[in-house]
Image: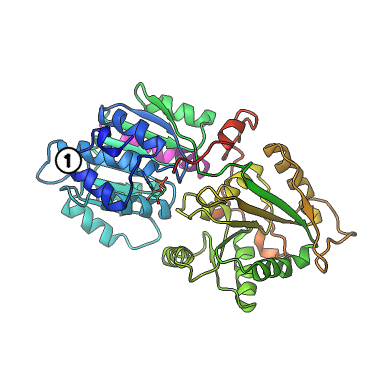
Amino acid sequence: MSFNSLGLSKALLKAVEKQGYTTPSVIQEKAIPLILEGKDILASAQTGTGKTAGFTLPMLQILSQGQQLRKRPIRALVLTPTRELAAQVHANVKSYSEFIDIRSTVIFGGVNQRPQVSTIRRGVDVLVATPGRLLDLQNQRLLSLSNIEILVLDEADRMLDMGFLRDIRKIIDLMPNKRQNLLFSATFSKEIKKLANEFLSRPVLVEAAPQNTTVDAIEQKVYRVAKDKKTGLIIKLISDGNWKQVLVFTRTKHGANRLCQKMVAAGITASAIHGNKSQGARTKALAGFKNNSIRVLVATDIAARGLDIPLLPHVINFELPNISEDYVHRIGRTGRAGAKGEALSLVCAEETSYLKDIEKLVGLKFPVEIIEGFEPDPNASTKPIKRGQGGGGGNRNSGNRKSNDSKKTTTRGFGAKDPKHDKKRRSKKRRF
Ligand code: AMP
């Protein structure tokens, strides 16, 4: 299958070629023709499947073929859960629209609204937005959604997890009833199906397998270690292995900061990425990680969500997540071009019950290793860590669950509702 047979215009094919893509991914192959036919779609696709081009390319084609109004009202809206994802999607829209006359912009909170507003005033065809800032500007009557022809909900499950359902409904109410709707979600929970029933019109179901890595292809290992020796152990593992690009997960923002500082003190370049970091700092950290100037990226679950983090040889759980599905999301970042990746978890006594839950969810028993000098504490209690508290040294302030990084529900991620049902999904392969 080549891109030429998908029904895309020459200008879009040229943009695709410029990106260096030769074959469409599964989601692109399935979704592009359907979207071009004007169908509503309900697509199951994760980050990494090529979903962004899957909806952006046909959307751009429809817009560029449609009637161009002089004032350029917003004709397509892409809603995303996070700022990072919004920025990434917009970067994609920009690249793919290089050879057509389509203008786009992105809006999200946490930055000054003025430049966003003035771009919108000058006229844009495509708006990529997070729900909060969109409603904010709409409430100030600074934008109108009354000309929307295409609505994309990207990572709809995340949006629901983050509590955006009411905002989404409000936003939909501001649009004409007659429009094309494209809903992308990594998981199909009951809530997603309900949302789809509410506003999609006779949608076609499109499924794409995630990632070129499977849970089975990832080597998963547990290091049993005393809580106060975790930092020493992780530094040893990264230094001894001379690992270059390591994604480390902590449970809290404070934990991420603290670990990052200790890594830097040990001579390992590291950056933290979490909800308390400014947009600029997050973008910079991710860029540094991608271009190898930063060896270790320490992230919280929500901050890592939806980010275009490359597949990596090493993912380390400095602390296990208390929501087992998050583990599967975390390690889904492991592997590279079909090669085996390694997902390591540093587990102290208090995390024993989390480990059991995770092993149950993924249906595996992980091999356990103990490194001399970093043994677990035989006297430590196995009582679970209080919700929201980080391990690795403890921090009284780290139990703050109110912030953005902490909005969790139990219906997130792989197999959130029914682990058995999702087993198939977990073991699917990435297509490119
Ligand atoms: P996405 O799932 O949209 O976040 O895309 C994941 C990554 O795959 C991005 O870095 C895209 O640039 C890249 N990508 C998208 N489509 C293709 C394709 N057909 N061939 C190779 N890479 C692609």
Mark 1: which amino acid? Ser
* Residue at the spot of label 1: 64
Q: Which of 127 and 16 is in front in this view?
A: 16
Q: Residue at (48%, 68%) from the top-left corner?
A: 292
Q: Can residue 288 be seen in this view?
A: yes
Q: In which quarter of the image is the N terminus?
A: top left
**Residue 78 position within the rendered picture, expressed as x and y whole percent measured from the top left:** 33, 43
**Residue 51 position within the rendered picture, expressed as x and y whole percent measured from the top left:** 39, 41
Q: Does the magenta stretch include residue 164?
A: yes
Q: Quadrant of residue 224?
A: bottom right
Q: In this view, does 154 lie above or below 123?
A: above
Please give the range of residues in magenta: 156-176
Q: Is residue 163 magenta?
A: yes
Q: Residue at (18%, 45%) from the top-left corner?
A: 11
Q: Nearer the viewer, residue 223 or 255?
A: 223
From the viewer's perspective, is 252 left or right of 77? right
Q: Residue at (81%, 55%) from the top-left corner?
A: 349
Q: In this view, does 42 lie above or below 236?
A: above
Q: Residue at (15%, 46%) from the top-left corner?
A: 72
Q: Which of 336 and 372 is in front in this view?
A: 336
Q: Can residue 147 be seen in this view?
A: no
- Mark 1 residue element: helix
Question: Magenta span: helix, strand or loop, mainly?
Answer: helix
**Residue 101 position within the rendered picture, expressed as x and y whole percent measured from the top left:** 15, 48
Specify the color scheme.
rainbow
> Which residue of the protein is positioned furthest toward the left in this rendering?
70
Q: Quadrant of the C terminus?
A: top left
